[in-house]
Image (tube, helix red, strand yellow):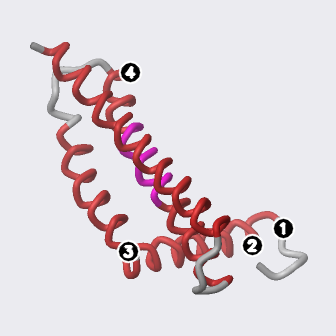
Amino acid sequence: MKPGYTGIKRLFYATQYSMMGLRAAWKHEAAFRQETVLSLPLIVLTFFLPVSIIEQILLVGSLVLMIIVELVNSAIEAVVDRIGSEWHELSGRAKDIGSAAVLISLLFAVFTWLLILINLL
């Protein structure tokens, strides 16, 4: 972002950069596409489930969190790949930790959905 932008102008440019990031993630990251395609119908489903508003927020929030963590992991991978293609212990560790964060967020989403859906029975 160009220095000196404040207020609405800064918000406008920040939004443009965010949209560019989402387009880049969709284009280059298969996991982001898969998680998004899986999450959208599940989010719509929450409007038809007999759950409280708090439960709906938890269901949707767990999916949104998973997508956020995937975006951060993709950013970490892009930066590591930009640094160099040769193997380095710290690069591998950064990618592994990012992947672990995605796994934890995915497990949290599954746990949240299972717990709430089982409670409906």
Secondary structure of the residue carrying tag 2 is: helix
Magenta stretch holds residue 62 = yes
Among the two numbered marks 3 and 4 on one chain, the one whose residue lies closer to the N terminus: 3
Q: Quadrant of residue 37?
A: bottom left
**How far, Cα to Cα, is label 2 from label 4?**
35 Å
Q: Which mark is residue 9?
A: 2
Mark whose residue sits in front, 4 or 1: 4
Classify 10 Å Cα crowding around label 3: few (below 14), some (14-19), many (20 and above). some
Q: Position of residue 43 (x, y in %)?
A: 26, 44
**Label 4 belongs to which residue?**
54
Viewport quadrant of the N terminus: bottom right
Residue range (magenta): 61-70
| 58 or 111, nearer to the observer | 111
Q: Earlier in the sequence, mark 4 or mark 1?
A: 1
Q: Residue at x 40, y 47 (%)?
A: 103
Residue receiving disc 3: 26
Q: Quadrant of the C terminus?
A: top left
Which image quadrant is residue 59 in? top left
**Circle nearer the viewer, 2 or 4:** 4
- Give, as a three-letter code, the residue at label 1: Thr
Whether residues under marks 2 and 1 lie with C-beta atoms below 8 angstroms apart, the answer is yes
Tell me if mark 1 has few (under 14), some (14-19) or many (20+) residues whose alpha carbon lies within 10 angstroms of its own. Answer: few
**Mark carried by residue 6:** 1
Task: Find the distance from the CA under tag 2 to the CA under tag 1.
Answer: 6 Å
Instruction: Give the Cα separation between the discs numbered 3 and 2.
Output: 26 Å
* Residue drawn at point x = 50 percent, y = 67 percent: 74
